[in-house]
Image: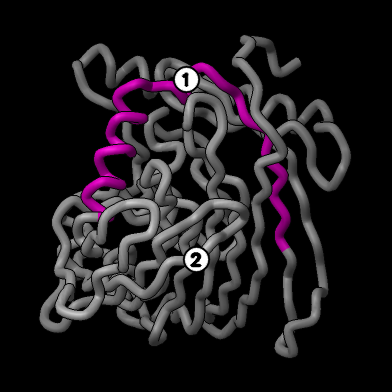
Amino acid sequence: MVSATSLPLNARPAHRLDKAIPLFFLLFIFPSTIHSQTTEDSPQSDSLAALSAASILERALERSLEQEESEIELNFEYSILSTIHTLDGDGEITETNTSRSRRFPLEGYLFEEILERDGETLDEDGIKKEREKKEDFLSKVRSHSEKGEAYEPDSMDDRGIIFNKELMSRYDVKFVRTETLRGYKCWLLSFQPRPGKLPDNNRMDKALNQSAGYLWVAQKDFGVVRVYFEMRRPFRYVWGIVATIRNTTGQLDFERVDNNMWIPKEIDLKLDLRIFFKNIRRHISQEWLGHQPFQERSLD
């Protein structure tokens, strides 16, 4: 989540396709060590033996790492439709903007270029800007590569969320029940910030520390099917002068595709914030229209 109107990052390491969504687009959780409460939260045997919340998530992490190491995402390109509804104080839509983009592997990373805005193909100026964006990205990636470094976005707050022990040390996770979602038999887990002092180094930390929700994990292969999250309390950043984020809810859906690869299916986000004296309310959605084997081509 970069700003009220921003969409997910234009580039990220290929293996982060389903594991890093910019601030406000995610709480997609794959921890290996968590603060779990398992006295009364172990699921009854369904398709597998009874497992604790910690065990379920441990297995989910193993599956995710296997996909990451295979770099299977680099074999495909993805078509994405993004929609931003601007809302008034009553929640009524006052403006709608759409864009269609192509996400594809580039220099070992996933890069996103816009192809259409509001149903119209890009004009000459738009094509030029996308080409310049691509050239700038390639320049940065190659510069880092020459130094033996991995490329990361310039802004720490724009890097998305990486699912690891450090992230999950801030959450308590509990088993809720088993249920079927979109044909996937799942374990439903809840998560919420644990009591006590939590990391608070930037605005992403602040958002994570106020977020709680639910996670659906497929029993077949421990892939994450859905994440729902909401902010429990408003928070301010930059000393409360620049912005106050009053409310955010989001849902991320994923689907199993080629060779049990899991990719995003749909992201739905509602946010309400105040920047200086201006209220900003947005309903932002992204739909993955499809994927196909990657074929290099020019933006022209």
Does 221 sit above or below residue 140?
below
Considering depth in this image, is 131 or 71 the residue closer to the camera? Answer: 71
Considering depth in this image, is 264 or 79 the residue closer to the camera? Answer: 264
Q: Position of residue 104 (x, y in %)?
A: 56, 24
- The residue that appears at 81% across and 32% down in the rendered structure is 122
Tell me which amino acid carries mark 1.
Answer: Leu
Looking at the rendered image, the disc whose residue lies closer to the viewer, 2 or 1, is 2
Considering depth in this image, is 272 or 242 the residue closer to the camera? Answer: 272
* Magenta segment: 56-84
Query: Which secondary structure lies at badge 2?
Result: strand
Q: Position of residue 108 (x, y in %)?
A: 40, 18
Q: Quadrant of the C terminus?
A: top right
Considering depth in this image, is 119 or 179 the residue closer to the camera? Answer: 179
Q: Which residue is mark 2?
A: 179
- The residue that appears at 50% across and 58% down in the rendered structure is 226
- The residue that appears at 63% across and 11% down in the rendered structure is 295
Does 278 sit above or below residue 282?
below
